[in-house]
Image (cartoon, rainbow, N blue to C red):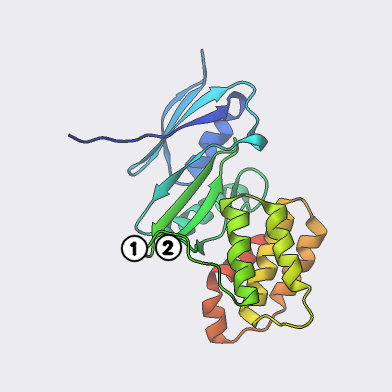
Amino acid sequence: MAETTIPMLPCRSSLVQPVVDFYTALGFRTTYLQKSPYVYAVVERGAVELQLYGMKDYDPAASHSGCYVLTDDVDALHTAFRAGLKAAHGRVPTRGLPRIGPLKDMSYGVRQFLMTDPTGNTIRVGQPISEDQSHRPAPKETFARALHLADLFADSKQDLPGAAKIIDRVLGLTDETPTPVQKVRLLVLRGDIAQRMGETERAAGLLAEAAAVRLGPDERESAADTLARLADLRG
């Protein structure tokens, strides 16, 4: 006996075609599309199937809908999805709807990224990197702790103002200094948050400051995910 779970996600009826196009850019096939008498669509990519049902007055900006996709190669999917979206949009969409987030090693033993479709559904794509899936305690060191908490606020809680406050506090310290890698990570995350909050000029300044931080070869390797995100945000 075998069972399969298929997420059923809401979709603003008037946005069904842009939503289908979004998933097409990610390499999904549209296996069903109905626009009358009511909207319904099914998209599939390998073993992943998403079903979308239309709602006339659904507000994408207020959406809390989504699902989690587990994979054994999250890096390959992130690379493929970024490339597909860049080909479709001329750039990697990092803010607004749709958008794709950075690849990160989370504090609960998962390497993951988030993407949000044009109707506000957030798809989390992750790969376990530890057998321990519980939250790790926040580090005691000032800047490592700030990064740990800001990541959780920005991605898990979706509390952008809260994440911004954490980063702004430590970037304003005068008696402690982050390592170059920590500084880049803090600035890129803060710039990412600023973009998503519509603070375009603030974001540009933060990202320019991040790009100006000098990193050695080992530091660049350590910050590879962050530097890739920096390129997307400035692209």
Residue at mark 2: 109
Q: Which residue is drawn at the image coordinates 64% and 74% (left, top)?
A: 143
Q: Amino acid at mark 1?
A: Glu
Q: Position of residue 82 (x, y in %)?
A: 53, 55
Q: In this orientation, which residue lies closer to the viewer: 221 or 82?
A: 221
Q: Position of residue 98 (x, y in %)?
A: 61, 44
The quadrant the C terminus occupies is bottom right
Label 1 crowd (10 A; few <14 / some 14-19 / many >=20) = few
Q: Secondary structure at mark 2?
A: loop
The answer to whether one can see residue 234 in this image is no
Residue extending farthest to the left is: 1
The answer to whether one can see residue 89 in this image is yes
Up the image or down, 64 lies above or below 173; here it is above
Q: Which mark is residue 46?
A: none
Q: In this orientation, which residue lies closer to the viewer: 31 or 100?
A: 100
Q: Secondary structure at mark 1?
A: loop
Q: In this orientation, which residue lies closer to the viewer: 207 or 18?
A: 207
Up the image or down, 197 lies above or below 49; here it is below
Residue at mark 1: 131
**Left or right of residue 182: residue 20:** left
Q: Earlier in the sequence, mark 2 or mark 1?
A: 2
Label 2 crowd (10 A; few <14 / some 14-19 / many >=20) = some
